[in-house]
Image (cartoon, grey):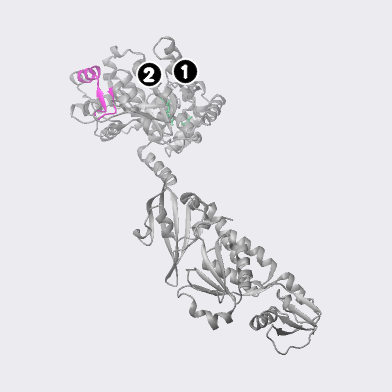
Amino acid sequence: MFPIKGKKKVAIIAGSSKTAAAITDQLSALFGAFIEFYGFSQKSWNNDSNYDMVLISTQTIFTRELAPKIKPGTVILIIRRTLLRTSWEKVMAIPVGSKLLMVNDEKDSAEETIALLRELGAGHIELFPYYPEIQNCPPYPSAITPGEGQLVPDGVTRVIDIGERVIDVSTLVDILTQFNLLHSDARDILSVYSESIITRSQGIQITMQGLIHTKLLLQQTLDMVQDGVIAYDMNGKITFFNSAAQALFDCTVQEAVQLTVNSLFARVKIDLDALTEEFSEALLQIKKHKVLASRQIIEENGHSTGGVLTLKAARHVEEQELKLRLHAKGYHAKYSFDDLVTTSSRMKKVVEQAEKMANSDLAVLILGESGTGKELFAHAIHQASTRSSYPFVAVNCSSLPDNLLESELFGYEEGAFTGARKGGKPGLFEQAHKGTIFLDEIGDISPNMQSRLLRVLQQKEVLKVGGTRLLPVDVRVIAATNRDLARMVNDGAFRADLYYRLKVLQLLIPPLRERKEDIPLLSAHFLRRRGADEQLVEPLLASLFRHDWHGNVRELENAMEYVAFMNDPNLSASDIPGLDEGDERELAETSPNEVPLQLYHSAPNNERFILNLIYQAKTSGRNAGRRSLVEQARQNGVVIHETKVRSIIEKLRSEGLIEVSTGRGGITLTEKGYHLCCGNTEKGKTGVMGVMGG
Ligand SMILES: Nc1ncnc2c1ncn2[C@@H]1O[C@H](COP(=O)(O)OP(=O)(O)OP(=O)(O)O)[C@@H](O)[C@H]1O
């Protein structure tokens, strides 16, 4: 039981101070923790204080004397009394047809007790009221008395004391309901008490037990809900208050059910009246918590009978919103381990290792040739980790010049440099807070960036460009490279301390040529994804197995894109662009400085076509980005997928023909690139356009 501040005050008025004291004691013993009881004899009742309720021991004293002496507006209840079960058993044991005196201190009380026994069903005996002032009384040898044994007249040889009458459960329910105190503690007391008495109202007892059970069930159900739930009646009095609401308001049910919703909210300085009667989605601050509140009005026969308030912790809402926001920004993992297609036992082991790594929070270094699926693994690890509901931010470290990469990763303060955005910009580390950052092509970062990165990883704090304040970040790092980092460390090209920090866990993805058994499965997967018939790959398989796949899975994906696009069952491997290994090898093996112009003139290929499109865009003042290049190609009657464009751009960049930045400039031609294109236009009468190498 919980003693409560500001308890309700109840006055008890009885015919004698003895009866008043007996009733007061009984009620205090039952509900003294919730209510204060004060006893008065009808003579001593002076009505000089304020009581929330007045209980009167019998109907008679109320009608005769008391009614005008009670302040208007006070709740009045006439007490119904009954017998303890043990007393009742004594009465029922009296032989049938027995004649007895009913001895009490007053005529009314004696008559009332007789009436009570009749009402309870003691029809087998005959009772005659006896009280001190009585004149003529039959000489019965036996008497019953409710604790007034001293008044039994001489000559009575057998006295059955049935003890003080006790308060009936119906009166107790009335009192508790009036004060909205039918909570679990009070209900427990009631149910124990009702076992010990003979109730005058079986109906009430059964209904009450049913209600208690239903209410208990409802309370238990609502306690399981994460949101705060508060129900109130037509007067605003709180009737339900679940566990989440108790935690939010730091208030027990016992306290809450004594309040109105308005007063409860007033405690946390919220004026509920200021909100519309029925509302949803009001953001309220309850103590330290932000909650999203909504109110539903309950109506019966067109009249409001109360309402229900639900309070959703903004934490949950924010998480949902965060997820949506991340999706909008693209800062979420797009792939899971389910997207990884493989049958190779070597790869399956790698997947197993990766799944284990997902369970830890340590840094992961993914090594493998370009196109082996390093990024796919990074997405999958994040998705399977405990950070999955937070951002996954992927950064290609090689696509940006040093200063840009720095401000992208760490952000910058307003005015950090000319052209810096007003208000500054958050860095990707900051955006990845609580999530994962994927640093692709980590082997390509400059020594300066290596030291900056090392500091962030060591201190778990980010210093914005131009900033002075360190910002704590909680980010898991997954890095990847197709370069031999260990060798770079040996050669002094990569910091050993950063290397060891990144490779706490290491994943090595084998190239496709070392797991050619994956070719049929992957080909079928890529064809299926493009809505093409998987059978299209069958006649090509022998050639696919012979190919070396230096571009790994990405190269296979591109090849299948072409197969799907052509949709020709008679297609041969030599028709597939890129599978003509000679072209690729020649370009790759030629030093950038010695790119043979002839190659671009004579051998029609994708690189040449895209380079020309970039040249065109630049000379006509347009932006050249991946998407715009796809569109430009389409306008030239050539269908090429964005992933293909991406790999071509990468190739052109590695050949030193273009530069790639995230800024408005996008892709720009290097001097060598320009030279190549200009030479091309000057020399070649075919122009720069329209040559699509397959
Ligand atoms: N096992 C696989 N199952 C299905 N798809 C795969 C698999 N491996 C790679 N891919 C697909 O191949 C393409 C290239 O993979 P990804 O970009 O992850 O490679 P990468 O190693 O990160 O390449 P790079 O080093 O060039 O960044 C992606 O479209 C990816 O979805």
Specify the farthest residue to the bottom: 136
Mark seen at residue 181: none
- Which corner quadrant holds the C terminus? top left
Question: Which three-letter amino acid code belongs to the residue tagged 2?
Answer: Gln
Q: 264 above or below 426?
A: below
* Relative vertical location of residue 10 with respect to residue 533 in this rendering, above or below: below
> Residue 178: x, y in percent?
52, 68
Residue, disc 2: 450
Q: Earlier in the sequence, mark 2 or mark 1?
A: 2
Q: Residue at x 78, y 77 (%)?
A: 159
Q: Which residue is mark 1?
A: 500
Q: Position of residue 657 (x, y in %)?
A: 28, 19
Residue nearer the viewer, 143 or 597: 143
Residue 77 occupies which quadrant of the picture?
Answer: bottom right
Q: Is residue 233 left or right of residue 589?
A: right
Task: Look at label 1 and name its amino acid.
Answer: Tyr
367 sits to left or right of 593:
right
Give coordinates of residue 266: x percent, y percent. Answer: 40, 56
Q: Which residues are magenta?
A: 659-679
In what quadrant does ligand 1 lie?
A: top left
Report whether residue 328 is seen. Answer: yes
Q: Is residue 666 inside the magenta stretch?
A: yes
Residue 427: x, y in percent? 34, 30
Residue 646 falls in image quadrant: top left
